[in-house]
Image: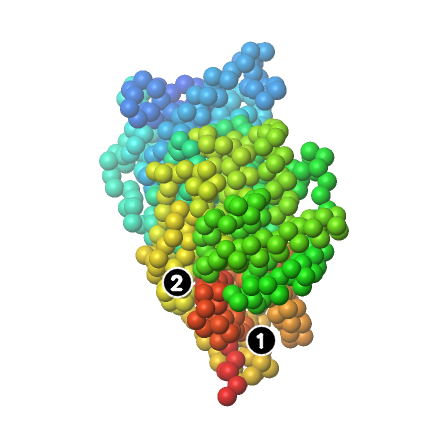
Amino acid sequence: MVAGGSAGERARRIRENALRLQRLAWEAHRQAARWEAAGEAERQVAATLMSLTATGWQLLVDREWPGTSAANVDMILIGPPGVFVIDVKRWRDPPAVIGGRLHCGGEPRDGEVGKLLNLTRTVEEHAADLGMSPVALKPLMIFAGHRLDTRVGGVRLLGRMDAIPALLGEREQLQPAMIRAMSGHLAERFREHALTSLDEPATPATPATPGPPGPSAAGDALFDVEDVERAATGSVLQAPIERWMTFLHPDQVSIVRRDWGGPARISGPAGTGKTVVGLHRAAHLAGRTTGRILYVTFANNLPRVQCRLFGTMAAAFAGRVEFTSLHTWARTFLDGRGVRLDLDGSRADDAFSRAWVSAGRDRVLPEIDATPGYWREEIDYVIKGRGLTSLEEYRTVARPGRRTALRTAHREAVWLLYEEYELLLAERGVCDFNDVLLAALAELTERPSEPSYAAVIVDEVQDLTLTGVRLLHALVGDGPNGLLLIGDGQQAVYPGGFRLTDAGIRIKGRGAVLRTNYRNAATILETALELVSGDPFDDLEGPSPNGRRTVDATYHDGLVLRVDAADAADHDRRLIAAINDLTAPDGTSSLAGAAVLCRSRRDIDHYHRCLSRAGIPVLRLERYDGRPVEAVKLGTYRRAKGLEFKQVFLPHHDADVNAAITDAPADPAGQERSELARRQLFVAMTRARDLLWLGSVASPR
Ligand SMILES: Nc1ncnc2c1ncn2[C@@H]1O[C@H](COP(=O)(O)OP(=O)(O)OP(=O)(O)O)[C@@H](O)[C@H]1O
């Protein structure tokens, strides 16, 4: 159909719907007149909202607040945008928001806002039993006799006449099955108000328009919890994330809403919904506090994706949550304090290379590992990453995550190398990433952050250094619901770790573990777990001896395709053919869910050329913000952290893992390198939802 024709058809349908709503509104008015006990304002508002029930919305009127017989909730409206908890007002003077507070006739009415927010929390509590996230709960005041559309303290204020278009304009989050289930559930929990006995009318019946539950409906089984779970899980497989993220597993919702007396941790294997819980938690906290929330990760591109997701999921709080990478935050913070540092990665690399030549390679270090990279990591993650300032400290420090034991002579040699590196950095007047974090921590310790954050949520915490975690801890301290650390040691893609106790963070009794993988097809999950099942890993609270963890899979079909090519050219030909296979026979492309992930930047450049030559559009992960784009995403394993794709292609996937084994089969440094290579590959594999393509080239005989 041509574009104009399609638009015309849509316009005709919208007009038809509008007329139908109008007819239903008149019918609703007539029926609402029978609600003798309700006030005039409520009757009018109910009649207006009733018209929505023709399109699948559900309306509960005048309900008892559970646990009381005197208090009532005017209305609960459940529709595609969520659950609206409604307080109807008939004020003589028009409501006004002045200085962020609700007023009427010049008098503040904060109490009314507080009451509605409390009531919303009660509804939220009951909705959570079905797994509904707090982001779908919407406090709403409707004013009879006034026109307005504004917000105050998380509450939307609408005039009666403004309500329908405003509600229909809200972004959809709930599907019809969920609306029906939630309505049935809330009708049971919020009984009809005993003192009013409203004669609720049945909605004008049309097959597609279920009406609000009448008096008898409360007792009927209107839903089945398993149906809700099935509807939610089923929709995951086709719907874009924001459509179904409103319903989580009830255990996840309980973590989102939990009150923690101090720093807390969410852990769990790949794909178990840790980030999802983190984002919903951010929205929940934003609704409970007036301060800002900081949501931090290590990777640079992830904040963009998370920020976009959050904006679609909890638009009302989008301005309250700051998404950033740790280094960006630290640099902005230092800039704001007038601290100037010349961060220059390539000059720092050069300084290290020279330091290695003059103070590293001829000493005892090559006995353990002759590659300078190993010792650069020792400086980055152990010495500077932990903020060590003297050889005495370094002599005795535990090095969790590093498998190679160092004798005194080795530690002294590393320290010399470190001092030489620092000297060369100082001579050049440049610094490295660790210096930025160390400077920010020093600055923050001297002059605490102002204004401070209400909460800091750290995602992928296992990739931070000890200094990074200390810095974020310093922002909120040990206050209730202040610091939340989310991560999984099995997915650490950088070497060298630390324990939370090293940072002075105690989370005893404030941890939650997620165990159900919602992302990967079972066969993909099995292949990925097999790879790391023999590897111990460090998980911030202590070592974990076994890589084979308990994970429940949510079964959906998937495929692992292994391609053993004769040579590199054959390998790349087969990769391109597999990507071209994603295009349907009618020519419609489905590249939006595809990603090619590589081990190194050199590979990235190679595959960018390869794909472009084959006429396949490419979007580098540096520029990806989570929006669906008809292009293959291309990036390194590290850049893919925290992301997911329908189809993941891993060219030469086993090259690093094999090289680590062949180069140094037995020594601890080689073992450490192999484990790290396997963990990185594991992360890349677990990005795949439905298809995992594993390319290798047969080794030359
Ligand atoms: N209750 C749920 N029902 C259905 N899908 C869910 C649920 N919770 C999370 N998911 C989905 O599971 C996938 C993985 O979630 P998420 O990215 O939050 O996991 P994660 O534990 O942070 O993963 P990783 O550690 O591998 O980055 C996402 O597609 C997410 O939307």
Residue 120 is left or right of residue 655, and the answer is: left
Which residue: 36% across, 47% down?
Answer: 513
User: Which numbered circle lies on residue 535?
Assistant: 2
Give the Cα separation between the discs numbered 2 and 1. 33 Å
Up-down relation of residue 516 to residue 607 (above or below): above
Specify the amino acid type for callout 1.
Answer: Ile
**Whether residue 678 is situated above or below residue 578 in the rendered picture:** above
Q: Position of residue 6 (x, y in %)?
A: 60, 56
Around disc 2, counting alpha carbons within 10 Å, would you say few (fewer than 14), some (14 to 19), or many (20 or more)? some
Residue at 69% of width from left, 48% of height from top?
431
Q: Which mark is nearer the camera, 2 or 1?
A: 2
Q: Quadrant of the N terminus?
A: bottom right
**On the picture, is 543 further left or further right than 9?**
left
* Mark 2 CB near ligand 1 (8 Å cut): no
User: Mark on residue 701?
Assistant: none
Q: Position of residue 305 (x, y in %)?
A: 57, 50
Residue 365 place in picture, x, y as percent: 56, 63
The residue at label 1 has a CB less than 8 Å from ligand 1: no
Whether 279 is drawn above or below 34: the answer is below
The quarter of the picture where residue 122 lies is top left
Question: Residue 401, percent across and down?
Answer: 45, 55
- For badge 2, the amino acid type reads Asp
Indicate left or right for 627 with 276 as reference: right
Residue 134 visible at all: no
Residue wearing tag 1: 576
